[in-house]
Amino acid sequence: MSVEKFVGTPKKVTTHVNQNEDLIFEKSSPGKKAYRLAELDVPAIDVSSLLGDSRRKDLGVMPELSEIEIIRHFTRLSTWNYAIDLGMYPLGSCTMKYNPRVNEAVARLEGIADAHPYQPEALSQGCLQIMKTLSECLIEITGMDAITLQPAAGAHGEFTGILLVRAYHESKGNPRKKILIPDSAHGTNPATAAVCGYQVQNLKSNAQGMVDIEELERLVDEDTAALMLTNPSTIGVFESEIHKIADILHAKGALLYMDGANMNALVGKTRPGDFGVDVMHLNLHKTFSTPHGGGGPGSGPVACKAILERFLPTPVVVVRESGTLGLEYNRPQTVGRVRMFYGNFGMFVRALAYILANGPDGLRQTTEDAVLNANYIRAKLEGTFELPYTTRTLHEVVFSDRLQAKHGVKTGDMGKRLIDYGFHAYTVSFPMIVAGAMMIEPTESESREELDLLIDALKQIAREAVENPELVKTSPHTTRLQRLDETTAARKPILRWKAPIAETPLVVDTAAKEW
Amino acid sequence: MRYLPKSPTDREEMLAEIGVGSIDDLFATIPEEYQLKRDLSIPRQHGESEIIDRFRGYAENNAAGYASFLGAGVYRHYKPVIIDSLVQRGEFLTSYTPYQPEISQGTLQAMFEFQTMICELTGMEIANASMYDGSTGAAEAIMMAVRVTGRNGAVIARTVHPEYREVIATYAQHQEIPVTEIGYASNGRVDIDALDAAITADTACVLIQSPNFFGTIEDVAAIAEVAHAKGALLIVSIAEAISLGIVRPPAEADIVSLEAQSYGVSIGYGGPYCGVIACKEKFLRQMPGRLIGETKDVNGKRGFVLTLSTREQHIRREKATSNICTNQALVALMTTIFLTVYGKEGMSELAEHNLAKAAYLKTALQQSGKVLFEGAPRFHEFVIDLPKRAEETNTSLLEAKIIGGLPLARWYPELGENASLWCATELTTRKQMDAAAAALGKV
Ligand SMILES: Cc1ncc(COP(=O)(O)O)c(C=O)c1O
């Protein structure tokens, strides 16, 4: 890293310190071990006589290393990642908030981490209480009537929610044909509608980036099953006419689905159930602090109004006559199961721990701080970057790169340059209604100092875009690797490691290989 | 609130900088009538020690201290300590999907290693970077086969995990994919003649599980031949991934849908786990989920990126191969570390211990009942027909602090009320098995 790459001195980062590390397979050597099994306390068996032809003979390139080498391997890899624990992660729509460590501790308690999903109900009361308590909290937070915790992520929640919509319409004799989706929506929304067997009808946003009420009125008809609406929208704006939107849909027998990805703007301040939403999903891995872990796991509970309750996936947690909790499978109108067992239970534990740590006052303050932070960034950077929609925003702010694009510098370039300043990029090029979108969501977890650092960095980058556009366009400069060739990666995909040619036996057909 | 890094002064000054009088001004776009003017009715704010106490209380209301013989799609294996040490590093735990490869190489390289190991274990050519779990993975594999073949139906063995079949039914109905179920032979394996008869010119794929729900290892090669003869793809679902250490991989399959929970992931009352789809390379464009690929940076250094995303929802929207976005990355990392710890030799040694324990358990329990489905190899589970109702038997076993095998009547009424599915892993001790045999003898 050369300091000359900066105009002035970057406050936050100097260089990303880390070491080189090969692939685990390249570090392997025959005969090394990182395990020792417990002594076998039963007679050894003759594998060949038990398995016959089904016996496996070879495990190919599976690695062989000692424990210290494994620790170093993954520790070195970890240092190549940016993370919330290192600093602000302003990815819009992703709600990258602090992941409390007590959540991790309680999820690993004996009795919880080792509970088997089929252990008898009487011996699962603790797990069932966790599910029931979390369900009650989420129902209260959303203002809905019922909930399922089964979906494994946001998109899976959407799938489940739209299945409820479908079952509802089917119970009235006609599943209907189409789902309305605003052009500002996340890609999972249309993809979900398709998986559920619906046609997608695009709903254009109005000049404020909000639902165009007249257009909605024009499009909703007896074939419309639902509108999938993100509220606040992907530009961070609360749909003020939400109840009118709900009324228009309801008048034609259609339902209002809410993508709850942006609930971090609403918790404790307003409730979707109160403003006309029929069904919605939550992302426990956004709003309720469960860690993203480099892409998952998530959890996407679906909350709904009473009219949809009988269609919820099975099983549901119920209180038995004896007062104990149980899992009820006998629900004739259920949409069925969307996942085996009861969902990503470990995430329920974490989300409940988060709710307990906050309480009602903490949750409200959290939402207020998230909105305060986003508006602070907006106020400080308005003018530096173009703000395509000037409507008041809540938990995130979406700028565009129009001013910088004149100098050939795009949103993606500035996002990459932000890395040099010690931050993760904001969300680039989403939502699609903003050309060159720069979508920033700070969350409540950032101090004023960290926000100021981000603001300074972005101002500096805007200056660089004018004075030295090449510097921005070739960024990042301080990272281990610089821009990667994604075109070749897609054109000639290499999706697994293979031993160097000399060592590879000349067998091409996998089926013929000796296993 | 201890997670919020702001002083009251910070808040006031920031509001002033924004130019509003109060925080409520920032929420003014929410119509007055929908603004919540009261506290949420949820438990009060808890101290950290109170949170831990409360969850300890929940844990005590579960089954701590019992010896369990439950498997049935989720398996208790030893989880090496370093898995938790490593995955709790903030750089892994608190990073997002690796959309910015320059600062996500840790996750990307680890997932590339994951994909490689999954290929090696399953005998497939490519693998994705994870699906939610084995059940949704199996459903996605079927939808994938429909896209690949342009045919529509699926033939599914009844020995596929019943909950997987339920999930598949949920997905299939709105894709209008007709599903036919086929039964099992007296040795517990797929009834090949029935399978042959069920495959038509409309069949996109055959889905089997191996080891199947009864623990029996299927003759994958023979089933593949039957499926392929009629132009259908073969999907093999694997719920017990440890078996791959010692059981021949289903290399004749076209698609393998694996649940990798057994690789060091706590059973945790049902999740999170780690599904993954692996397949022949020629089906690459129809693969759902994220893929990590190798490439170079501008200086020629090796690196990894998310690739082939033109299959995915954020680019293709309603035409995507799946709606999946968030997957199970951290769990996939856990499995990668597990596989690295055991490695080439350990995986087969570990699998052998499982085999040995199950063989012992079977002999011990045979004194009290009849083991069904003899005549085909199995891994570490088996079905036993006991003299009394399985539910009743299990209730009596609880007195000896034993959780017996899973009663099967709910899903396989044809086996009667007395059949249950028992499992032993490397963690099941001889003492526990002897105790179970003794307690069963008294029931
Ligand atoms: C607005 C919106 N909807 C849906 C999703 C999908 O959620 P998940 O990734 O949990 O499936 C996201 C997450 O990226 C999102 O931002």
Image: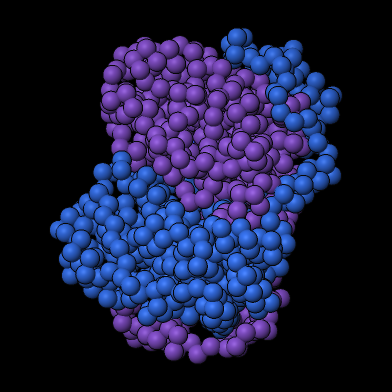
Chain colours: A purple, B blue
Between B364 and A417, the residue placed more toward the observer is B364
Q: Quadrant of the C terminus of chain A?
A: bottom left
The number of discs equals 0
Residue at the outermost top position: B32
A86 sits to left or right of B108? right
Q: Position of residue A287 (x, y in %)?
A: 62, 35
Say which residue appears at 63% left-offset and 27% top-offset: A141
Q: Position of residue A209 (x, y in %)?
A: 46, 21
Between B385 and B129, the residue placed more toward the observer is B385
Question: Is residue A2 placed above or below A392 in the rendered structure?
Answer: below
Question: Is residue B172 placed above or below B344 in the rendered structure?
Answer: above
Confirm whether residue B310 shows in the render.
Answer: no
Say which residue appears at 52% left-offset and 77% top-offset: B366
Between B390 and A63, the residue placed more toward the observer is B390
A297 sits to left or right of A257? right
Place residue B48 in its image quadrant: top right
Q: Position of residue A503 (x, y in %)?
A: 44, 87
Say which residue appears at 46% left-offset and 68% top-offset: B385
Residue at the outermost left position: B201
Say which residue appears at 54% left-offset and 69% top-offset: B423
Q: Quadrant of the N terminus of chain A?
A: bottom right
Question: Is residue A12 placed above or below A323 in the rendered structure?
Answer: below
Between B155 and A56, the residue placed more toward the observer is B155
Q: Position of residue B268 (x, y in %)?
A: 62, 55
Confirm whether residue A11 shows in the render.
Answer: yes
Place residue A394 in its image quadrant: top right
